[in-house]
Amino acid sequence: MLTTESIMEALREVKDPELNKSLVSLNMIRNIQIQGNDVSLDVILTIRGCPLKIKIQEDVENAIRQLGAERVTVTFGAMTDEERAALSASLRAEQHASREKAPTQSGKAPSTPGIPQTNYIAIASGKGGVGKSTVTVNLAVALARAGKKVGIIDADIYGFSVPDMMGIEQRPTVIDEVILPVERYGVKVISMGFFVEDNAPVVWRGPILGKMLRNFLHEVHWGELDYLLLDLPPGTGDIALDVHQMIPQSKEIIVTTPHATAAFVAARAGAMALSTTKHEILGVVENMSWYTDRNGDKEYVFGRGGGEKLAESLNVELLCQIPLGAPGNVLEDPEYSPSVYSTNHPTGKLYDELARKVTQAITT
């Protein structure tokens, strides 16, 4: 028999996809009406036009139908300004509490006060165009496939590309002053690209860029994370120094191509990590290592040996070599993204192995 109590109990298992909290605990379920086997109710969203409204509706309807309801009618509303302010205060208090307590998970680095307690991995390169962002998003997705809780900060403020690479079209939800990252492939993402209209150029200078990075760390509701990847701008500029000051315990991965000049330039980023920022380098990823032609033969279009030489000069491991190519996704695919490889793709398997090596290096 359908009752208000049984419906509320069933909906305790339905979560807001952005907050990862029960709709019931968030007081989003209201005005339940039951007539025979028909149920109607109101779902009060955090904001009007919530991008995940359809997902919430499907989850609510499925949970109630499993109780025996034949027809479920969901009407959406939105929280009042006062309710949003109260929720924002609650989220801030939760963030503060989680960031102040000691880490509980093995392998997590101790955190600077006020920022998420997690393992930080900065993805760096000496120059642009070597596929640093591609490595970032695929490593993050591979870690998520392995069951890790992962986030990405697209810290390449001038050349942000992570949202486009991951096929993200929605923007973050902002509740009062708390920003909820966008989740895709199980990875939480925040990027300057979410806050720029029509792909406009960013012409800010160092201090403002540093402030934006601080906001991404302090104002975003990351929740619990195992890894937070930072896609750094190429080179050794202000953002890399800001990362050192804010996250001194961050690890780094250096990305290069096999070309000797690219590896030579990347060595500067590695030298900065070792001498200036004191960050530990986990290893080197060589991208665009070869191209496989239609006959299955490897063509080394950018030369050979750059990644190995760089790893040798930095006295670290060459973690993997990634071939030149594309995922081969099609626009009609609901999971389409221009740059993310599936676990069934040969290159996707390489990223899964990279994720395994990174996890092992950090936890040991």
Image: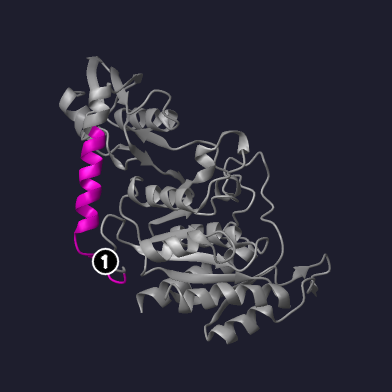
Q: Residue at x 43, y 60 (%)?
A: 242
Give the mark count. 1
- Residue drawn at the location 60% of the way across and 57% of the way down: 341
Tag 1 residue: 105
Q: Dividing the image into 4 quarters, which one contains the N terminus? A: top left
Q: Nearer the viewer, residue 301 or 309?
A: 309
The residue positioned 69% from the left and 72% from the top of the image is: 262
The three-letter code of the residue at mark 1 reads: Gln
x%, y% of residue 176? Answer: 31, 32
Q: In this view, does 39 lie to the left or right of 120?
A: left
Residue 320 visible from this viewpoint: no
Q: In this view, does 153 lie above or below 175?
A: below
Is residue 316 found inside the magenta-colored segment of the image?
no
Who's the residue at 63% across and 61% down the image?
Answer: 345
- Is residue 309 visible from the viewing direction of this image? yes
Q: Where is residue 199 in the image (x, y as percent from the top left)?
A: 62, 38
The quarter of the picture where residue 322 lies is: bottom right
- Colour convention of the picture: one colour
**Could you tell me what secondary structure mostly forms the magenta stretch?**
helix
